[in-house]
Amino acid sequence: MGRRKVTHQLIADNSTRRVTFRKRKDGLLKKLKELTILCGLRACAIIYSDYKEGPELWPNHKEVRVLLNRLSALPVEKQTKYMMDQKDLMNRMIQDAEKKLEKEQMHSRAMELGMIASFKDMRDADYSEELVKAADVVEKRINVIRERIKAVESGAALVKKE
C-alpha cells in the first residue's frame, strides 16, 4: 500500500496542521535518534513552534547546551563552513548544472565531429581546434576501455567511473 502524493503547502485546517506537525516532528526526532545511535555521533534539535511556549529541545537541555557551547567554541569559518541559505543552495545547483551542461556540450561536439569526419573530408574546413578536443575525448575513451580490458583479464570487479 503506497502513500498518496503530498503537496507541500500550508495546511489550511489548524487541527490537521497541528497533528501533521506532531507526527512529522516525532518522525524527525526518531530519525535523529537513530542517526546518533548508528553513527555514534552527538546531535541535538531545537524546534520552535506555535503550539508550545518556548523551544522544544532534544534530547535534553543539558546535551543541547553542551553541543551549542562546542559549536560556539569553533572559529567562525568552521561554524559556517557547511551552512547554506536558499541563495547559496541555488547558486551551487546552478554551478553543478553548468558544469554538467559544459561536459555534455563537449561530448556532443566530439560526437558531431566524429559524424562529420565519417561522412566528409575534414581538410575542406577549419576544424583544427575541435579536432584536438575530439581527439582528446577519443583518447580518454580508449584509455577507459583499455583499463576495463585489463580489469576483466585480471578478474577484478568492474567499477564505473564518472
Image: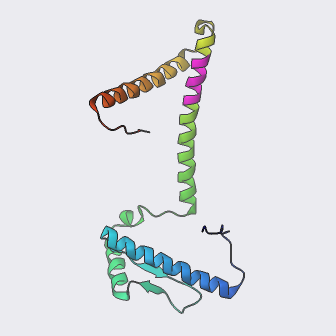
Tell me where residue 11 appears, x and y as whole percent.
69, 78
Q: Is residue 18 left or right of residue 78?
A: right
Q: Residue at x 54, y 41 (%)?
A: 100
Q: Residue furthest bottom?
A: 53
Q: Residue at x 31, y 73 (%)?
A: 73
112 in magenta:
yes
Q: Residue at x 37, y 78 (%)?
A: 68
Residue 126 at least partly seen: no
Q: Is residue 111 above or below residue 124?
A: below
Tell me where residue 140 appears, x and y as whole percent.
42, 26
Q: Residue furthest front?
A: 1
121 in magenta:
no
Q: Main secondary structure of the magenta part?
A: helix
Tell me where residue 70 appears, x and y as whole percent.
31, 75
Q: Residue at x 62, y 86 (%)?
A: 18
Q: Looking at the rendering, which quadrant does residue 41 occupy? A: bottom left
Residue 70 at least partly seen: yes
Quarter of the image with the C terminus in it:
top left
Q: Is residue 21 left or right of residue 61?
A: right
How did the renderer colour the structure?
rainbow
Q: Is residue 133 left or right of residue 20?
A: left
Q: Looking at the rendering, which quadrant does residue 151 occupy? A: top left
Q: Is residue 21 above or below residue 85?
A: below
Quarter of the image with the N terminus in it:
bottom right
The magenta stretch spans which residues? Answer: 107-115
